[in-house]
Each structure stands twice: as C-alpha cells, then as structure tokens.
Amino acid sequence: MTLQRKIALGSTFLFLLLLLISGVSTYYISVLKNDTQEVLKDNYESVSYCHAMITLLDTQPSQYTRFDDYLQKQENNVTETGEKAANLALRKAFQQFSRDSTQASAVRKNILHILHINMQAIQRKNDVAISTARRANLYISTLAAFLFLIAFTFVLNFPGLIAEPIKKFNEAIQELSRKNYNFRMHMDAADEFGQLAGAINQMASKLDEYENSNVAQLMFEKKRAEAVINSLDDASIGVDKHGTVLFANQKALQLLGLEAAETIGQATSTLAQRNDLLKFMLENPSGTSPFKIVMDNRENYFLLDSYKIQVDEEPGIVFVLKNITTFLEKDVAKTNFLATISHELKTPISGIKLGLQLLENPKTGALNSDQLQLLQDIKYDSDRLLRITSELLNMTQLETGKIDIKLEAIDPSELVGTALQALFPQTQEKKLQLSTQFAPNLPKVWCDPEKTIWVLINLLSNAIRHASESDRLTVSIESQGQQVLFSIQDQGPGIAPEFQEKIFEKYVKAPGSKSTGTGLGLAISRDFVEAMGGKIGVNSQLGHGATFFFDLPQFQE
C-alpha cells in the first residue's frame, strides 16, 4: 500500500468517526424535538381551551356563544384516551347549563376532568422526553468516549507511520555522512518509504564500492608519491598549516637524525625543541645564504628554500635543503683558477705594454704609418686584455672575500671629477654634451675612493659606449637621508625591464649591448658598492636611455 493511500485511508477513517457521532446526535435531537412538538401541538391547545371555558364560566356565564366556540374547538382536538367521552359529558352538562344556570358546577367538573386528562398526558410525554434525553445523553457520551479512544489511538499511531521512517532516514544519512558505507536500512514496507530505503541502501553499496576502490587508488598514489619524494636528491620536508609534519624523505630524515615514525604526524614545534636544524629551518624558511652541516666528518653546504602548497584548501609549506657542496667546490676551484690566470697574465701583458712604449719612442727608430697603426691596434688589444684580467682579478678577490676596502671621508664631487677626467678623451671623441648637477652643501661620503672611482668610471664608460655622437650625458649628486646618491643619465637605447636586475649578475649582458667586455663590470660595481654599505640600480625604458645610480653612506663626524 502506498503512503498516499495510507494517508487517504487515515483521513477517511477520521471523517467517518465524525460523521457517526454527528448522525447519532442528530437522531436523538430529532426525537426530542418531535416529543416536544407533540406536547405543544396536542395537549397544550386542550389546556388552553379548558382555561378559556373556565374563565368564561367564572366571569361571563352568559356568554354561551363564545363558550360553545371553545367547546367545539375542544371537541375537534381529541388526542387522548377518554377525552372524547369527557367532551360528550361536557357538551351534555353545557346544554343543561344553558337551560338551568344552576348547573354550572357540573360544567366546571367536566372541564376540570378534561384538563386533568391532558395534564396527565403532558406529564407522561414529559417523562418520555426526559427518558429519551437521558438515553440520548448516555448513548452519545458512550459513543463519544469510544470514538475518542479510537481517535486518540489513531492520532498516537498514525503520525508514527510517517515520523519513524523519517527518523530512520535521518539516521541513515548521518551514518553515510560519517562515511559508514556498511550501514543498511531494514524496512519491509511496500510504500514510498520502502522504495526510498532501497535506494539509500543501493547508494550506500555504490559508495562503499567506490570508497574501497578509491582507497586502493589513494594507497597506490601515496606509495608512488613517497617513492618520488624519496628519490629526490634534495632533502624535503612537508608541513601543514598547523605545523604538523606531512612527509619527510630519507635525505631529510638523515640530516635531521630522526626516524620516520617519530617525525611524520608530529608537531614541528615539539620536534624543534630537540633538533637544532629543524629549529633553524622554521626560523629561516627562505634563507638566502648557504649554511654548513657536518656529515660523515665532512663539511657540506646547503641552501634552504621553501614553497607553499595547498593541503585541504589551506596553505602548507615544503622545506627543501639543496646540497650545494659540489657547486661551491667547483666555484672555489674556478675562482682560484681565474685568480691564478689573471695574476699570471698581468706580467706578460705589462711586458707587452712596455715593449709598445719602447717601439713608440723615436729613439728606437722611425715607424711608417702602417707600423704606427699596427702598434695602435696592439696597444688597444693589450689595454682591453689588461682590463679583462683586472676585472677577473677583482671578481676573484670579491668571491674569496679578500677584497681590501679602505674607507675614508671624501668630497663626492672630487670622486666624480677624477672619473670624468680619466674619461675626457672618450667624451671628446664622441662630442658628448657632458653636464654635472651637484646639490649644494653636499656632505662627505664614507667610502673607499679607489673603489668608488672604479665604479664611476665603469658606469661612465658604459654610458659613453652606448651613446650616439653629440648625445647628452648628465652626472648628478644629491643627498638622501643618511646616504649620498650618484646618478649617471644617458640617452642610449635603454634596457628592457626584464633585464634591469640581471645585468648586475656575472657574465650577463643586455640584448643589443655594444660592450665587448666580459660582463663582469656591473657585477663588480655592485659588490664594491654593497661592500661599502650602499645599493646600486638602474631606471630605464627602451628607446629613452638609462639612469644608473648608486648611493653611499654619509660621513658621520
């Protein structure tokens, strides 16, 4: 039976109960009504006629005609047994009274007899009505109580037919939401609830099947991910937003000196209390400087980096320790090699320059124009080779930390003047419009004059090299807070934004550069400036020239 049919039958049953009690009540009300109407219709008129005749007899005994009218009405309203004989006796007494007025007592006696008959009938009918009312009250009360019990039982049980299955469905949904896919509903009903229970059981079965297959797939993917993580050359540790360790590969566990069982799933704050390396990693998640770890009685150098990951829609962190020991060893070997080569090349280059000077001396003999041009070419190449070896030597000194910085207080305009004087021939050759803009009352700078002039000459040389004939070249100095800012503005081709940081790295040149050097000049300039407590940079747009700038600390007396 369907749920709709059950609800319809339940509603029909309640309607029939109401209809039954209404029908019984209506029946007994109708019976009482009929009994009352009989009293009013039959006996009340006779009583009324008798009272009228007695009144006439007492007050107006001569009104025979009116008396006869009431008597005729009474004769036509015979409703009780013996009432007809009483009417005949009254008629006879009235006729005698009409002839002899002394017979009034006989008339009165007959009227009272008729009145007595009707009063007895009224009393009898009243008793019947009372009995009927009592019986009706008993029947209706009994029926009402019986129907109330039935209705009350129905009200208690019928909602349960709907509420109980709904409770079971709610329980089933909660179990499924807790991923208890083995839960099953047991309902034998053939209605819509039974069909829904079957559908939920089928859904739970499908979810259980999917969960089992999904778990197997997840375990496979987990093992594959762990294999990938353990195969990484870099030590890797994953931490969620709460600081709980999600994973750590074998290299990371080896560095930390921990076992997987005591690390995975543990709070980093707890582990860091007894592990200095982990504490350092948490305090410096993206360290830029290499640090040393002694492993197997050998010094190893690592670089720490961190990456954000999404774990349950919340950011976690992966710490990566890159072993750069091999790279540092190769870099040291390269630096030592370059230092040795640079130092060894300076001696023969100096000999070549000395030989060129001797050849240029007229005392060694006159040279023709071709020979002089050849000497100029050799001198240019030797100067270029000497400059390259000097840059390489400076770079090796910077990398090995052997750079000698001699700080002193000096007028910044003096530094610029020295650099411009050294490059005066080049500016004249290109007919550049050179201008200086020095702010008034400039403070002294605290720097190494030799290194600062080297930086200025390098920046000015680059500007001259990329300038066209008759371009404007502007050198400016101004004070900014506790620093003094040097700027060199040219009208060259400019530098693309993506290369404005890279050109300060070693061996990097901007695309379209006219430089024939090694690409070390700006890298050395940056290291010199930073070693003296300043910063260097460039502002440029393609086709609108470039402005190189650097600042140095003011001298504090």
Image (cartoon, rainbow, N blue to C red):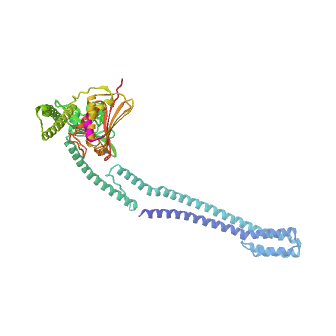
- Quadrant containing the N terminus is bottom left
In front of the other: 508 or 311: 508
Residue 399 lies, with reference to residue 226, above or below; the image says: above
- Quadrant containing the C terminus is top left
Residue 504 lies, with reference to residue 67, above or below; the image says: above
What x and y, as percent, mark residue 263? Answer: 26, 36
- Number of marks in the rendered image: 0
Residue at (21% x, 47% y) in the render: 224
User: Mainly helix, strand or loop, the magenta region?
Assistant: helix
Question: Which quarter of the figure has residue 102?
Answer: bottom right
Question: Which quarter of the figure has residue 424?
Answer: top left
What x and y, as percent, mark residue 220? Answer: 22, 49
In front of the other: 418 or 357: 357
Q: Is residue 123 left or right of residue 473?
A: right
What x and y, as percent, mark residue 305? Answer: 27, 38
What x and y, as percent, mark residue 258? Answer: 23, 34
In magenta segment, residue 423: yes
Residue at (63% x, 61% y) in the render: 134
In front of the other: 204 or 369: 369
Q: Which residues are magenta?
A: 422-432
Say whether residue 260 is visible.
no
Q: Spot the residue most to the left.
A: 365
Q: Is residue 394 left or right of residue 207?
A: left
Q: Spot the residue most to the top.
A: 557
Question: Which quarter of the figure has residue 472?
Answer: top left
